[in-house]
């Protein structure tokens, strides 16, 4: 009986057509991984752009809030 080490080093026999099918499957898997990596890179780029846009919105909202506070303060000071 073979132990685990001997089984790891033992030759594996497969039919040629099965071997070609395996190679084809591996090629498809590699292509899908490349596509997935490309999609992930695009998602990261979009997220980065989105984060920048949100920062700009926050800045704009802060500026509007300051202006409203100034107007509010000025309006109420003039009435007193």
Image: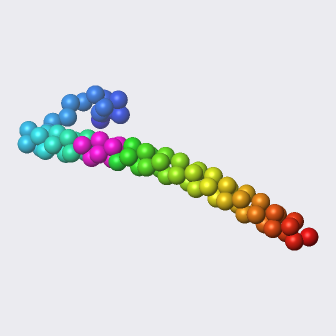
Relative vertical location of residue 18 with respect to residue 50 in this rendering, above or below? above
Residue 12 drawn at (x, y percent): 20, 34
Q: Quick one: which residue is furthest to the right in this view?
A: 80
Relative vertical location of residue 6 with respect to residue 25 in this rendering, above or below? above
- Overall secondary structure of the magenta section: helix
Q: Is residue 75 magenta?
A: no
Residue 7 drawn at (x, y percent): 29, 33
Picture residue at 49% right of the left edge, 52% below the top: 50
Q: Quick one: which residue is furthest to the left in this view?
A: 17
Picture residue at 35% right of the left edge, 34% below the top: 4
Q: Quick one: which residue is furthest to the bottom in this view?
A: 79
Labels in figure, total: 0
Relative to the observer, which residue lies in front, 69 or 49?
Answer: 69
Residue 36 drawn at (x, y percent): 33, 47
Relative vertical location of residue 45 with respect to residue 65 in this rendering, above or below? above
Picture residue at 20% right of the left edge, 41% below the top: 27
Q: Is residue 22 visible?
A: no
Horizontally, residue 15 falls left or right of residue 60, namely left
Horizontally, residue 45 falls left or right of residue 28, namely right
Which quadrant does the C terminus fall into?
bottom right
Relative to the observer, which residue lies in front, 22 or 63?
Answer: 63
Horizontally, residue 17 falls left or right of residue 4, namely left
Relative to the observer, which residue lies in front, 46 or 2?
Answer: 46
Residue 62 drawn at (x, y percent): 68, 56
The answer to which image quadrant residue 2 occupies is top left
Relative vertical location of residue 79 with respect to residue 21 in this rendering, above or below? below
Give, as a single range, the part of the protein colored magenta.
31-38
Relative to the observer, which residue lies in front, 70 or 20?
Answer: 70
Q: Is residue 67 visible?
A: yes
Which quadrant does the N terminus fall into?
top left
């Amino acid at each position: 009986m073979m132990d685990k080490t001997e089984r790891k080093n033992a030759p594996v026999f497969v039919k040629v057509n099965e071997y070609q099918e395996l190679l084809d499957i591996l090629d498809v898997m590699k292509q899908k991984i490349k596509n997935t990596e490309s999609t992930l890179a695009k998602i990261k780029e979009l997220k980065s752009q989105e984060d920048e846009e949100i920062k700009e919105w926050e800045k704009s909202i802060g500026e509007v809030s300051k202006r409203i506070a100034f107007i509010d303060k000025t309006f109420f000071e003039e009435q007193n």
